[in-house]
Image (tube, rainbow, N blue to C red):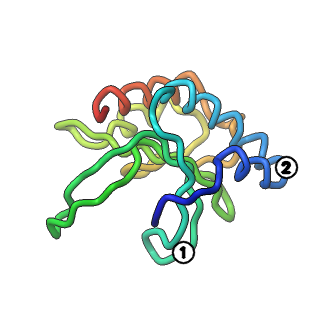
Amino acid sequence: MERTDVSPDIFIASLPEPLRTDLGRVDAVVSKVMKGHSRVLWGGKFWGGSEQSIIGYGDHTYQRSDKKTVDWFIVGLAPQKNYNSLYVNASDDEGYLIRKYADRLGKAKVRSAAITFKSADDLDLGVVEEVVTLARDRLS
């Protein structure tokens, strides 16, 4: 995936309802926490080979297991076919940060670095704000 020149605001505005409102609500929370950091639309083939568009917040460079250095984002937000994803690319000695908050996030599935949800109404946005704040502070 690569950064695009498309504004995240234009991307969100182009989405059909209710997706536009749902992503807009989560974007507002993440944008507030990540104020002062980059907010960029990424596009291209994601893991597994599917075409994706992801709003990335903050810049994060890391080294993969194959020793290749990769530019990425701290937090990402993406619409999927059947759900939405919030990626939180931060961990500590115990693993990915979001796993510690799985039982407080609301009606969402928590994977290693991803929270998947159907609607913003399914999430506890206050807990999302906590998790994004921890990720920002850990990786900024």
Residue that badge 1 annotates = 50
Vertical placement of residue 129 versus 20, above or below? above
The amino acid marked with disc number 2 is Glu
Q: How packed is label 1: few (under 14 Cα within 10 Å), some, or many (20 or more)?
A: few
Whether tag 1 and tag 2 are in contact, CB under 8 A, the answer is no
Q: How many marks?
A: 2
Give whichever of discs 1 and 2 has the lower sequence position: 2
Residue 53 image position (x, y, % from top left)? 59, 61
The amino acid marked with disc number 1 is Ser
Residue at 32 percent of width and 26 percent of height: 137
Q: Nearer the viewer, residue 42 or 47?
A: 42
> What is the C-alpha distance between the residues marked 1 and 2?
23 Å
Helix, strand or loop at mark 2: loop
Residue 23 image position (x, y, % from top left)? 69, 43
**Horizontal arrangement in the rendering, residue 70 relative to residue 75 (left or right):** left
Residue that badge 2 annotates = 17
Asked whether residue 109 appears in the rendered view, the answer is no
Residue at 58 percent of width and 33 percent of height: 106
Q: How packed is label 2: few (under 14 Cα within 10 Å), some, or many (20 or more)?
A: few
Vertical placement of residue 118 versus 26, above or below? below
Q: Quadrant of the C terminus?
A: top left
